[in-house]
Amino acid sequence: MVRMPNFGDRTWSSAYTTGTARHRGPASPRARHAEADLRIYELSAKRSWAGAGGRWLIWPLRAILWAALIVITYRGITAIALNNSPATTAANPSPAAASSQFPVTLAEAYALDFGQVYLNFNPQTQAQREQQLAGFVPAAVATANPDLGWNGSGQAHLQSEQVAGIAVQDAQHAVVNVLAMVSGQLMELGVPVYVSGGSVLVTGQPAWLSAPPVISPPSPATVSSDPATQAVLMNQLPAFFQAYANGDAAALNRFLVPGTSLTGLGGGVAFDSITGLVVPRGGSTRHITVTVVWQVLNQGNPTTAKLTMTYGVSVVDLQSGKWYVKGISASTEAVGGQ
């Protein structure tokens, strides 16, 4: 019986053994058949291994292909998004970009000059007003509406005006809001402007807008007063405010913390009295509130006019109860709010 080869331990039947060591003579027909069978078996085994290896490589190749497709798709979508972004930005610039390109100062100055003409009208000067307005608006607007909405009756007088703000729409269009006092009434005027190449035009009729509303501030916080320090300061502060009214530098320096520089009022008013003083508790530095009555002077001569004003004063105790002024400013407290 012929035993088939075992490729694991390389054990062979003598019938399959070839070579000069065991093959002393011509091979028998049986041996030749066995050797042919062995070669067929070996070729079959090699083909089986190659086929199995080929199938195993399909899965990594598929994974690599899918990864490549995902990367290509992602890059394509990203490229489309990035290519579209600059066009969108250019077509619709941000408000900040538009503001940086728009000549704000020029437009505001132009709106103020326009307000000087527009907010003053009187039938006796109608023709002059129409001629002046024509220099601010397009020719077609001046021809069709020379008075820009005024019916030619009544009168208004501009007392004061200033720019309250500007709303820039793009690199060429904006609305300038002018805060104005007209015939004793506070109002805002919205002026539409167009700029191009350093030139400005009011594009049409402006809009009369409401003035900023009057609001009530929150109630001031309750202050724990220091009566002892308040009494000391009430004796010291009148002399300081007298020197402050006169603007005498030498006199002022006697009341100031060393290194503090303060300019007085130069004799425009004279000190009258202190009607209110709030001194909170604290350390050697206090922030006090002082209500002062000034007498208005006319070329150095007293008048009957008096003004009551409230100051915030920073004082420092440098010599055991001797207080010196470090700074003075307007107070956030209303007159009589103490």
Image (cartoon, helix red, strand yellow):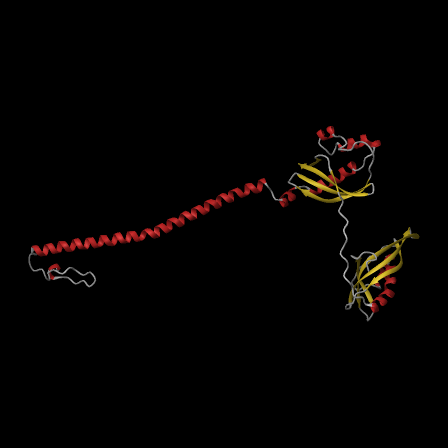
Q: Is residue 97 left or right of residue 271?
A: left
Which residue is rendered at x = 25% and y = 53% of the image? 50
Instruction: Say whether residue 106 is visible.
Output: no
- Percent position (x, y) of residue 28? 7, 56
Viewer-nearest residue: 55 or 111: 55
- The quarter of the image holding the C terminus is bottom right
Against 15, is 74 above or below?
above
Quarter location, residue 85: top right
- The quarter of the image holding the N terminus is bottom left
Which residue is rendered at x = 51% and y = 42% of the image? 83
Against 277, is 172 above or below?
above
- Percent position (x, y) of residue 148? 75, 33
Quarter location, residue 31: bottom left
Instruction: Say whether residue 31 is visible.
Output: yes
Count of labels in the image: 0
Which residue is rendered at x = 73% and y = 28% of the image? 144
- Percent position (x, y) of residue 300? 91, 52
Viewer-nearest residue: 35 or 225: 225
Viewer-nearest residue: 316 or 257: 316
Taking the view exactly as shown, the residue that stands out farthest to the top is: 143
Q: Is residue 201 left or right of residue 87?
A: right
Taking the view exactly as shown, the residue that stands out farthest to the bottom is: 320
Quarter location, residue 147: top right
Viewer-nearest residue: 211 or 40: 211
